[in-house]
Amino acid sequence: MMMTFQFFLLIALSFKVVSTNTLPTNEEYLNITNLDEILQALEKQNFEVAKWRDLCLVLGIYKPTLNGIEATNQHHGVDRCLQECLSSWLSKADKVKQKGGPTWYSLIVGLRNIKEINTADKIHRNKHSQEHPACEIFERYTSDSSIQKNLLSLVNLLYGEKIVKKVLWPKDGRELLQHIGNSICVNYQILEAFGVVLQQSPVTMSIGRNILKEYKRRFPEKKDVTSSDNKNVHFVASSDLNFTKLRGEFADAIFDINQAMIDKPSLQELYQYLRWGYKHLRPHLRDCENRADILNLISEHSSLIDIGLLESIVFKFNIEEAKPAIQKYKENVNKFRQSLRHVLDEKFFHRHLLQSETITFSIDQDVDGITLKDVEKLIKAAFKEHAPCIRVHVISESNSFTVTCSFPLLLYEEINLAAMENIEALKEKGLQRLTIGFNTVYDKACEQQLDTEDDHCSQSIHSGRLEQMAIYISVKQLNEAHDKEDHTSTNSYLDMVSSVSSWLLILLILFITTIYVLVKPVLTDQKREAKSTQETLDKESQAHLQTNIEETEQARDTNDKEYTRSDSDDAGTEAAPHTWRHFKRAPKEVIIIGSFGNHEQWKLPGTIVSPKSIPVGLEGSYEDWIAEEIKSIVEIYEKNSKRYELKDIPEKGKSRQFYLDKIKSLFENCKKDEALIYYTGHGEKDTGNWCFKDGVISFNDIFELYMMHFRGKSLQIVSDCSYSGKWIHDCGKKLDEYGILSCGHKTREQKMLFKIFTSCQPHEEATLLTYSRKGMKYSEEDEGVVINYDEEIKMEPAQKGQNPMLVDFRHIHCYKMPGDQCELDSTCTWEDRLSKKRERIVLLVDNKHNKFPSWYYLLISEDAFDEFKGKQEKGNIGIEKVLYSGPGKNPPSDVKKKLNLRFDMNTYASYEYTDH
């Protein structure tokens, strides 16, 4: 049963589009202003400076960066190298963010990883613990071996609650703890969420409780409301005097009821009653050692407007002394049930809310006409007999009103099914949206979009449903495994029957979900094809497609190129034959950057400036013609102010930093979903970097600004300078460093959305006025700017031409629709896809052994191709770089498909050879 269930869960989860959650942004990230402080700390604690390379490697700085630092500072010694290396770390260069970002905690972990234990411990004691009490609490309690042993079982919950980002599955609990420690160092409030997560596992529950106690003591953000008997109950302070009074009365009631229950019922009676009547309390009961612990647990699960749990115990065991306190408090609560207006944004139940244990109702009704009693009826209508387990946390007002509640994660299955059964009744009450954990049970806005082609809503809902199910099942398994140790043989039998029924129900849900995921792409394709004029392929033609994949791929490539020979996100996408491959067009905010001035007067050590060539017969100063070129570009983009909102145009004599600040401002303040940066001017030889009087702007400079301030939105770059094509390869290299495969499925999933036009190839020089006059125009028909690429442009017949380029990194290259699973595997890199102009694919069939022929696909560089042909003609071929190989004379069609996905084979020069 368990193996079958896990099989279906893995199938379902394999179709989920996983997003990368970034660490919380917080001022506790170290920055360049902390450099001196860090250097002093390392020096004071006797760090061995010769290990600077080892330290920076584990902190996330790439080896080429370290080589550059070492080469630049070879005459200044290792101290200078350490300083420069830490500067890169503080600037979040290379892979620093994936390693946890620049924090004291990540520095300490890095020191320990390179065996600088004494230095790490001293910095931790003298610096880190004093300034970061949350980290000190975390390290103190997570030194317990049970944490590391059991933490991996909570990894789904840790990911879902964004305590750690979704990275590769950690190999052990120690690695996972390092990720958690980094998150807490950046944002101390994550410690509270971590403590609540630990309480979901019976093994780590007591540790989680202790962390929460210490957290509340060290971070006293909440004020105490004290009863007349000095019994403290914690709630956020309110300016509403009546509400504050109710909190005091709540504290009094809790204290009086607990006092009345000192002798009755017995500890065993209380334990058994709660264990069998309140399943979600079972894990917490295991951690209760005495009567006081159980009474405290009951108090913690009572809220300001709901003491039903206490009331049920009082009347079950007929505790007469407690009944007056119950009755008095209920009368006080009724005074607040007249209108929601008096209790908006007040906290009824103070406990850190995990997203996986949160319920939200959005109701389309006027808040003034609703009472707390109506909210209680709404909850009962939704969850029926499970309503007593739901706790109202806060009620807020937006267009209507929203009720936020909590529920026990162990009851997710029953609560979710109850809500689904009662959804029609909730709609009649004005329900707009209902979420249970990450699962969206109902969303009226998405329901209205089901008949449209845009299915992002359904994808998001499906993804959240799977995430919540994965979290629930992992926590349920933890508790059921621990439960078996406590049961008698009879109870074990009963639990087994209950467990089997429960698993069968879960299995049924996941089976249906899996079938839905498998069938959905087919249904989606049919819906799209029914709306288009293209013929729908039947099963026979699909089989034909598989066996004749070369023809299909060639047709795909031809169709794409017919459209994209002149390309823009704004022009002609509706008429394109494969529009689903392209990213949805959007209005843009535009800045234009120009490089003015006599570059020969600039002092740029190590930089070779390559200005644009001047066309033959062009008279006047270079600077005047650059100004003329910029003017024509501005005029093109000003023709449609709705689609292009021009924010800045170049200013003469401005610096590199001036324009970096402009780009940063564009990213930070952009109100549209897309931005465009257009550059014209001097380029750096061999790099295509943009040259200014005080330095250059590289693609990496823009990439870092994008990742910090604009990630998730589209960025279009148009670079008109010599060697500008190099930037396309720089972008591909960056995406490869982040492990993003060469398809728009992956760049969209990871929210790195680039589209780059360049006026020439990586090895070419650009010519003045050529790109702006011959390479781009405004199309009245399409109401957008159209930019040509992939064909030579020149001003005059005698002029040396240049070959513009375009790569849309958002473009889907595989054969799956945008919402489907990408076909690419780990071999499909951007380096391979972008290197097609420099390499050739060769199919070699070896017939030396007639009975056992074999085939090879080779990748041969352009420079070595003539040598390869010469060797082939002489019958002496040395095979060095083999992409794929196999027995026989004809490669399988799936191999050809893999080649096309990896290299875009139709655009390579392909050759076939037979070696006899």
Image (spheres, rainbow, N blue to C red):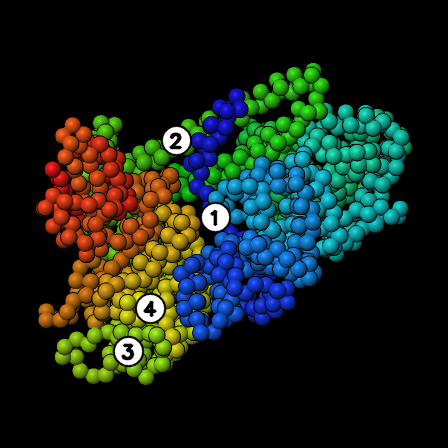
Residue 716, x across and y down, in percent: 34, 60
- Mark 4 Cα shell of 10 Å, populated few (<14), some (14-19), many (≥20): many
Query: Considering only order in the chain, which callout, 4 or 3, is on the residue closer to the N terminus?
Result: 3
* Label ID, residue 689: 4
Residue placed at 42% from the left, 56% from the top?
A: 713
Which amino acid does the dot numbered 3 rest on? Ala
Residue 65, x across and y down, in percent: 42, 62
User: Helix or strand or loop: what does disc 1 sit on?
Assistant: loop
From mark 2 to mark 3, how far is it between C-alphas?
Answer: 57 Å
Q: Which residue is mark 3?
A: 627
Which amino acid does the dot numbered 1 rest on? Thr
From mark 4 to mark 2, how far is it between C-alphas?
Answer: 46 Å
- Can residue 748 be seen in this snapshot? no
Query: Considering only order in the chain, which callout, 1 or 2, is on the residue closer to the N terminus?
Result: 1
* Label ID, residue 20: 1
From mark 4 to mark 1, how far is it between C-alphas?
Answer: 30 Å
Lateral position of residue 674 relative to residue 326, left or right: left
Lateral position of residue 431 relative to residue 326, left or right: left
Q: Nearer the viewer, residue 505 or 782?
A: 505
* Label ID, residue 518: 2
